């Protein structure tokens, strides 16, 4: 891993979503791809009670040579990948900056307060406008809907990984993804995961 | 994962979670026995080891509780094996009685206690520290600062334990245990250890005598000599490092993951030339000579740690003793308010403390105009995400029935709670209908209810209920239940049996027919235990709301002694449940009266399963097919019978 392959060191990625969306899995897969490329990666994440319907967040620090803190400092995210749209806003509030690139899955998961009618959930237009206003680049991808078409909504996280790879910011490619999936999942899951990954790459390039 | 942990390739870096790194360190040390009780953030250590138990010739168990875990691990040490015992911070308190005696008797094979703590209580109902047990019980304490060290230090802790012949405590925190990073592996040993307990030698022989804390004063003296030896070893430990200029303006003293926060803050502020970092891997007892050398470098010291000022206190004591040689120092830390005295730290908090002390004001984390814009645009658009019971969770159904039974009973009855997912029943209105009114440690719901159940003589007329999970039942409820039965306390215990230690990820417990290593074992039946105590026991399916409510109401009306109701339904997240939905749910839009229904949106406003949404445009309830787990319970909630269930194909 040569420093020149990263535009910044450390390069900071936040993957966010709601408990149960496969956030932790996504951060591990992405980090494993990067470690295979010789990067030093630190992932910071919490789970446990936070999984029970709450917001979850993984911090990935990617570096050519150094171990970084598992918590990204305020205002220092380079990529935000949100498996749930409102979580993109929540993360930008603390980790955003004018140069941040944001990837948002468009399918909402409503907090119980919203379901109960006590809280308001912003409209898709409001979310879109806010993310655009607070980022340098913004992509909106119907990752869960694409995953449902593939037969399993959980694959939304893989569509998002494909999209991150497709952004071209990190030294990772389809082959890295394939190798990580081969070493961490049963063989019969490879094809559908590759399909989900390819959809993500495709969507971000559109 | 399974193969990765026992792989052996030179020069390869692996991405490991802190807990996996600790497990690998134990494997490299040749650990034979690993025991623990699940608790976030500690659980993955035993989980990881259990997966390689066969290949690694290990014995791994999820014990009934932390005290028993340490007793089993101690047996291994007495038999000459290396052993590891893991738990979260509270567990050290549970095990502390035995730990105190074990530290006095000493150990044989290397034995370590790994306490994984939760600063900020990200997954806990406390953020207590167990570091204070080290000086209180007089055992050495190690704190790894990153993922590589988590592995290396764990391995070394076994050697230290054998060197001083006592248990060694290794403390991790959530951000290390559940963080991940690159780790290079060392060699796995190929020596096989033979277990043999020698106990027929001279009484005080440390190798062949009795394992016992008496004669107390003599053994206590030996224990303190072990600590002195550890301190000498710590003077030269490679886990204590200094980075920075020869004469720093400010010396940071730190340990654990806070070390990475310090490095980040120095980098962000660009003050590498002005600030030095002394990182302690061996936090108790502190090596005085090493400390003296570094305190001599400067007069200003900032101590960075979480949660309590443990290092701060011990450094200050030694600095006071050294004052004639090193002069008077100024200390910054929690006591001076440079860091909060509660909660976890992060790089920004270290940046802020450093900026204040060094008078640096150039660092900008988030551009102020961006911050203002972000605040303005997001504050009304980020609805809070409350904790909830998962879709398909049997606890939602159980607590719904408990809540309704108490309402129907009308005597202001209440529920004493316990530790598990169902602890969230203390929340209202997001979770559990605010049913639970007390929540402390494992098993304490039953103990507290046992007390309340005796206060009839003081005019207490409220019926008392207590809930516990199946794993908690074995952990600490049994003695409290025996107490309640023996004293004829008037109470109802409801065991929310969801078939595993669900909160922490389905670890096995004594009620199951499988152990941590996947072997078949005898299950210990909760109902039979209760019956053997002379308690009347009934078992119901919590998804049968009406029947459950009826039994609870009947139990509440009984006025003497203890009743037990076991509500049995497996967790919605358990692998067998996740595989498929039992029911396909849908809302019949013809039948759903929406806001015109007298129910006032009971399903979405009160029942609050996240699988049911409210369609604002149609003004009808709607099932979210991605989230719904297909348990079918909501079909009984709707008074208009608009929520329909069909057996899933």
Image (cartoon, rainbow, N blue to C red):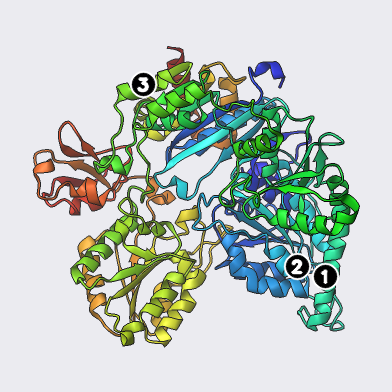
The residue at 20%/47% (across/down) is B645
Question: Mark 3 belongs to which subunit?
Answer: A
The answer to whether A200 is drawn above or below residue B333 in the figure is: above
The residue at 12%/52% (across/down) is B639
Quadrant location of the C terminus of chain B in the rendered image: top left
User: Left or right: B515 with respect to A122?
Assistant: right
Q: Position of residue A13 (x, y in %)?
A: 55, 28
The answer to whether B527 is drawn above or below residue A49 in the figure is: below
Q: Are marks 3 and 2 in contact (CB under 8 Å)?
A: no
The answer to whether A73 is drawn above or below residue B2 in the figure is: above
For the residues marked 3 and 2, what is the alpha-carbon distance in whole angstroms? 58 Å
Question: Mark 2 belongs to which subunit?
Answer: B
- Dot 3 surroundings within 10 Å: few (below 14), some, or many (20 or more)? some
Question: Mark 1 belongs to which subunit?
Answer: B
Label 1's element? Answer: helix
Give the labeled residue for mark 3.
A128
Q: Position of residue B158 (x, y in %)?
A: 78, 58
Q: Which mark is residue B138?
A: 2
Q: Nearer the viewer, residue A73 or B612?
A: A73
User: Left or right: A26 with respect to B634?
Assistant: right
The residue at 60%/36% (across/down) is B348
Q: Position of residue B590 (x, y in %)?
A: 9, 39
Q: Which mark is residue B224?
A: 1
User: Left or right: A136 with respect to B382?
Assistant: right
Label 2's element? Answer: loop
- Could you say which quadrant of the image residue B54 lies in? bottom right
Q: Are marks 3 and 2 on the same chain?
A: no
Q: Are marks 2 and 1 in contact (CB under 8 Å)?
A: yes
- Could you say which quadrant of the image residue A87 lies in? top left
Q: Nearer the viewer, residue B249 or B509?
A: B249
Label 3's element? Answer: helix
Q: Position of residue A25 (x, y in %)?
A: 51, 37
């Amino acid at each position: 891993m040569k420093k020149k392959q990263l535009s910044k060191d450390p390069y900071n990625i936040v993957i966010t979503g709601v408990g149960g969306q496969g956030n932790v899995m996504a951060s591990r897969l992405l980090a494993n791809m990067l470690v295979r490329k010789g990067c030093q990666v630190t992932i910071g994440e919490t789970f446990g009670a936070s999984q029970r319907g709450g917001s979850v967040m993984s911090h990935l620090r990617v570096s050519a040579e150094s171990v970084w803190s598992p918590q990204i400092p305020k205002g220092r995210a380079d990529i935000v990948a949100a498996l749930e749209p409102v979580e993109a806003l929540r993360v930008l509030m603390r980790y955003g900056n004018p140069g941040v690139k944001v990837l948002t899955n468009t399918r909402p998961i409503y907090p119980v307060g919203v379901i109960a009618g006590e809280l308001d959930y912003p409209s898709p237009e409001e979310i879109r406008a806010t993310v655009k206003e607070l980022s340098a680049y913004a992509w909106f991808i119907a990752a869960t809907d694409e995953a449902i078409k593939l037969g399993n909504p959980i694959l939304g996280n893989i569509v998002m990984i494909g999209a991150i790879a497709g952004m071209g910011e990190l030294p990772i490619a389809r082959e890295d993804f394939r190798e990580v999936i081969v070493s961490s999942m049963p063989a019969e899951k490879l094809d559908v995961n590759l399909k989900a990954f390819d959809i993500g790459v495709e969507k971000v390039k559109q | 994962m399974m193969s990765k942990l026992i792989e052996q390739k030179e020069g390869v870096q692996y991405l490991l979670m802190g807990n996996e790194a600790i497990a690998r360190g134990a494997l490299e040390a040749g650990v034979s026995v690993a025991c623990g009780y699940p608790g976030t953030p500690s659980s993955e250590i035993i989980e990881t080891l259990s997966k390689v138990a066969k290949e690694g010739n290990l014995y791994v168990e999820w014990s009934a509780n932390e005290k028993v875990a340490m007793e089993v691990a101690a047996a291994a040490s007495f038999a000459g094996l290396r052993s590891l015992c893991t738990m979260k911070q509270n567990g050290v308190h549970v095990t502390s009685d035995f730990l105190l005696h074990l530290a006095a008797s000493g150990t044989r094979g290397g034995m370590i206690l790994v306490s994984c703590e939760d600063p900020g209580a990200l997954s806990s109902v406390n953020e207590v520290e167990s570091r204070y047990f080290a000086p209180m019980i007089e055992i050495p304490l190690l704190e790894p600062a990153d993922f590589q060290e988590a592995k290396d230090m764990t391995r070394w802790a076994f050697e230290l334990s054998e060197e001083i012949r006592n248990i060694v405590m290794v403390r991790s925190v959530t951000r290390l245990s559940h963080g991940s990073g690159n780790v290079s592996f060392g060699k796995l040993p190929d020596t096989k250890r033979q277990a043999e307990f020698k106990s027929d030698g001279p009484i005080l022989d440390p190798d062949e005598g009795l394992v016992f804390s008496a004669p107390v004063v003599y053994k206590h003296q030996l224990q303190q000599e072990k600590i002195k030896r550890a301190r000498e070893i710590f003077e030269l430990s490679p886990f204590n490092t200094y980075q920075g200029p020869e004469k720093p303006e400010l010396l940071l003293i730190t340990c654990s993951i806070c070390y990475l926060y310090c490095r980040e803050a120095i980098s962000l502020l660009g003050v590498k030339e002005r600030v030095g970092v002394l990182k302690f891997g061996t936090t108790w007892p502190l090596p005085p000579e090493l400390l003296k050398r570094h305190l001599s470098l400067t007069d200003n010291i900032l101590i960075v740690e979480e949660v309590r000022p443990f290092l701060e206190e011990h450094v200050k004591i030694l600095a006071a003793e050294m004052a004639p040689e090193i002069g008077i120092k100024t200390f910054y830390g929690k006591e001076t308010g440079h860091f909060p005295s509660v909660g976890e730290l992060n790089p920004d908090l270290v940046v802020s403390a450093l900026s204040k002390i060094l008078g640096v004001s150039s660092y900008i984390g988030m551009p102020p105009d961006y911050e203002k814009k972000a605040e303005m645009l997001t504050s009304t658009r980020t609805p809070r995400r409350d904790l909830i019971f998962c879709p398909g969770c049997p606890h939602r159904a159980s607590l719904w029935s408990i809540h309704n039974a108490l309402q129907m009973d009308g005597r202001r009855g209440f529920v004493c709670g316990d530790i598990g997912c169902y602890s969230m029943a203390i929340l209202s209105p997001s979770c559990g209908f605010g049913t639970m009114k007390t929540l402390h440690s494992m098993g304490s719901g039953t103990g507290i209810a046992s007390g309340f159940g005796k206060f009839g003589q003081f005019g207490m007329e409220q019926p008392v209920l207590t809930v516990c999970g199946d794993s908690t039942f074995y952990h600490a409820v049994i003695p409290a239940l025996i107490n309640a039965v023996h004293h004829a306390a008037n109470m109802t215990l409801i065991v929310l049996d969801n078939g595993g230690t669900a909160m922490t990820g389905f670890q096995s417990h004594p009620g199951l027919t499988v152990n941590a290593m996947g072997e078949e074992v005898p299950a210990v039946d909760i109902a039979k235990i209760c019956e053997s105590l002379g308690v009347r026991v009934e078992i119901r399916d919590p998804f049968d709301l009406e029947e459950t409510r009826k039994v609870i109401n009947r139990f509440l009306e009984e006025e003497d002694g203890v009743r037990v109701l076991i509500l049995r339904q497996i967790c919605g997240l358990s692998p067998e449940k996740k595989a498929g939905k039992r029911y396909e749910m849908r809302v019949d839009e013809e039948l759903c009266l929406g806001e015109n229904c007298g129910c006032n949106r009971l399903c979405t406003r009160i029942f609050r399963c996240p699988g049911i949404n409210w369609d604002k445009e149609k003004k009808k309830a709607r099932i979210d097919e991605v989230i719904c787990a297909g348990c079918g319970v909501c079909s009984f909630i709707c008074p208009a019978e608009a929520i329909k269930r069909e057996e899933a194909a």
